[in-house]
Image (cartoon, grey):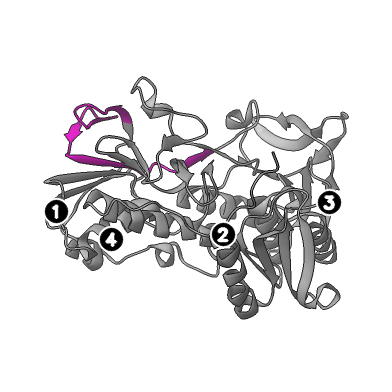
Amino acid sequence: MNGPASVLVVGASAAGLATAEALRRLGYAGALTVLGAEAHPPYDRPPLSKQVLAGGWEPDRARLRTREALAALGAEFVLADPAVGLDPATRTVRTASGRALSADAVVVATGARPRVLPGQSELAGAHVLRTLDHALALRSDLLASSRLVVVGDGVLGAEVAATARSLGLAVTMAGPQPAPLASQVGPLVAGLLAELHREGGVELRLGTGVSGLTGASGRVTGVRLDGGEVLPADVVVVAMGVDPATEWLAGSGLRLENGLVCDSRCRAAEGVYAVGDVARWHHERLGTLLRLENRTNANEQAMAVAANILGADQPYVPVPYFWTDQFDAKIQVHGVLPAGADVTVVEGDPAGRRFVARYERDGRVTGVLGWNMPKQTRLRRQEILDSLAAPTPAATP
């Protein structure tokens, strides 16, 4: 394949590393630089809220590659130096230390930043969980505490709550949804997740917003709900979602709307691509702009971007996929689960907590969800592919 003389990947986590590795696998022999904001070499994020936080893994086990494997890539890794600006015309990235790195192709893989509550940064014991350092700091606090409040009822909040219970803490989960993951999986599965967490000892204070934190002597003491009630806490984890890390691209002239907006080839401008949590691209089969925050997409999109940098000119049209482990439940989702979808249990039984559910809207299969049935769920993925391949019904005049 033909390709540019040099490629600069901005972001040294899973998506950035996967892009570099895919370029080499496809035969790219040009200059390759990976710029990272953190001092750590590339590591995996999913274990942070589970194995690393629980103490089952040493931090080094979360590394994506050994030092020898990274060296074999033949790439220059520039770490602990965040990007602060990009000139798309010259494809030059400025860094916090004053470097100016230029390349013939730039891949933006800067991920996302966790949202925080007002005043959170001023209180010890109030955490977010996105990086390895976050996970280690949170684990240290949990081991010295007895009461945790998780602000957030999505995947990350639910995983942290389950892990903290395994460490013996009293855990309360607060958030605006009626049940954990309600907006992501619908009422049937969310209701089962609520049961799972209650049985695991998590107190659920859901269906209400959080207005802020309380503190004393510089340390967090509780979480204030919208109605004024305060949930006492020794430690708080704020897991209210993330925002794409695009602030460094302000003034670049690139389109920034819930991510770096790209065409169907994940291209934001000539010679500028995006991959991973920061990328919002046009999915040709779904006919919409899409941004995915999961590990599988980081890998798959990286392979597509690498191929397009080298001239493939192919649209990126994945079937979205994510998974979550909470207590004894392994939940896997293929496709999309739209609000108001028709949900049918097609295998197993929710009462036994082993089942597969199919999600349909307008007569099309949009997604499947499996609870402790990974093989059967994966086989059902074909129904989504068949539905995407089918012609769209003609509109009635």
Q: Which residue is mark 1?
A: 2
Q: Amino acid at mark 3?
A: Leu
Instruction: Work out which quarter of the rendered image holds the C terminus and state it.
Output: top right
Determine crowd level at label 2: few under 14, some 14-19, many 20+ residues with C-alpha closer than 10 A: some
Residue 126 in which image quadrant: top right
Residue 7 in which image quadrant: top left
What residue is drawn where x is 52% and y is 49%? 292
Q: Which one is closest to the eye, mark 4 or mark 2? A: 2
- Report whether 289 appears left or right of 254: right
What residue is drawn where x is 22% and y is 63%? 26
Q: Which residue is mark 4?
A: 22
Q: Earlier in the sequence, mark 4 or mark 2?
A: 4
Position of residue 358 relative to residue 122, above or below, is below
**107 in magenta:** yes
Determine crowd level at label 3: few under 14, some 14-19, many 20+ residues with C-alpha closer than 10 A: many
Q: Amino acid at mark 1?
A: Asn
Q: Earlier in the sequence, mark 1 or mark 2?
A: 1
Q: Which one is closest to the eye, mark 3 or mark 4? A: 4
Picture disc at residue 204: 3
Number of numbered markers: 4
Position of residue 59 relative to residue 31, above or below, is below
Picture disc at residue 371: none
Instruction: Work out which quarter of the rendered image holds the N terminus and state it.
Output: bottom left
Q: Earlier in the sequence, mark 3 or mark 1?
A: 1
What residue is drawn where x is 69% and y is 36%? 220
Q: Which residue is mark 2?
A: 388
Mark 1 and 2 residues: CB-CB less than 8 Å, in contact?
no
- Report whether 179 appears left or right of 285: right
